[in-house]
Image (cartoon, helix red, strand yellow):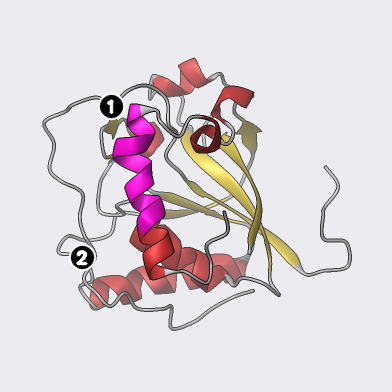
């Protein structure tokens, strides 16, 4: 795919993202961790989330199906790939959203009602600088005790990702009334608008 930012400094990062799939599954689990405010910015940074797509990454199968990944035994994680323009958004800002709004980084092999290794908290880096900044920020957040539990996010080298089927792309946009979206994702969207109004783009 040709980059939409010819002549600009662009980068890509792959992170875990929740996939809206079926209706809410009521599970007896602990509530998601809420970060202590104010949420700190990274002490170090690297170079607007412009283009994104739903992916699976980190496993041993090539082009796995959603059904295969959902078993939790393929090694893949449900992720999103984000291409960002360094003149519009920094890597550090992206990490702030990831750790404060997008998911609970203290949950091991789960996110909200979804359980399994495919929901583990992960950042796949594409450069030594991305790795350094992500690891330093995790250490910074743990030292500041932003969460009452330790952050379990893993930082691993990017190897490959495989696009999910079209049904999962922009699921919220196409299914705003889906019960899973209403219960799990819309509150996160409201928090994004509240805490990062300058970064939100409809």
Give the residue displayed 47% in from the left and 69% down from the top. Answer: 197
Q: In this view, does 54 lie above or below 13?
A: above
Q: Position of residue 92 (x, y in %)?
A: 51, 72
Name the quadrant containing residue 126.
Answer: bottom right
Q: What crowding class fits label 1: few (fewer than 14 Cα within 10 Å), some (14-19), or many (20 or more)? A: some
* Circle 2 SS class: loop
Give the residue displayed 63% in from the left and 32% down from the top. Answer: 162
The CA span between labels 1 and 2 is 25 Å
Horizontal relation, residue 17 to residue 116: left or right: right
Q: What crowding class fits label 2: few (fewer than 14 Cα within 10 Å), some (14-19), or many (20 or more)? A: some
Q: Magenta region, mostly helix, strand or loop?
A: helix
Give the residue displayed 31% in from the left and 30% down from the top. Answer: 116
Q: Which residues lie in the magenta part?
A: 179-190
Q: Name the residue under label 2.
A: 147
Judging depth in this view, the residue of 98 and 59 nearest the camera is 98
Say if the magenta span includes residue 135: no
* Circle 1 SS class: loop
């Amino acid at each position: 795919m040709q980059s939409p930012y010819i002549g600009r400094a662009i980068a890509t990062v792959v992170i875990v993202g929740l996939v809206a799939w079926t209706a809410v599954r009521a599970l007896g689990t602990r509530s998601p961790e809420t970060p202590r405010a104010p949420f700190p910015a990274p002490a170090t940074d690297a170079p607007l989330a412009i283009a994104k797509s739903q992916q699976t990454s980190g496993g041993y199968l090539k082009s796995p199906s959603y059904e295969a990944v959902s078993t939790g035994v393929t090694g893949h994680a449900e992720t999103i790939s984000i291409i960002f323009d360094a003149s519009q958004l920094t890597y550090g800002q992206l990490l702030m959203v990831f750790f404060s709004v997008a998911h609970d980084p203290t949950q091991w092999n789960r996110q909200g009602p979804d359980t399994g290794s495919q929901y583990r908290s992960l950042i796949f880096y594409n450069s030594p600088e991305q790795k350094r900044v992500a690891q330093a920020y995790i250490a910074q957040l743990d030292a500041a005790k932003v969460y009452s539990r330790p952050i379990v996010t893993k930082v691993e080298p990017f190897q490959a990702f495989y696009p999910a089927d079209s049904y999962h792309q922009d699921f919220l946009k196409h299914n705003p009334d889906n019960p899973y979206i209403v219960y799990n994702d819309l509150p996160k969207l409201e928090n994004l608008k509240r805490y990062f109004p300058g970064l939100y783009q409809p």
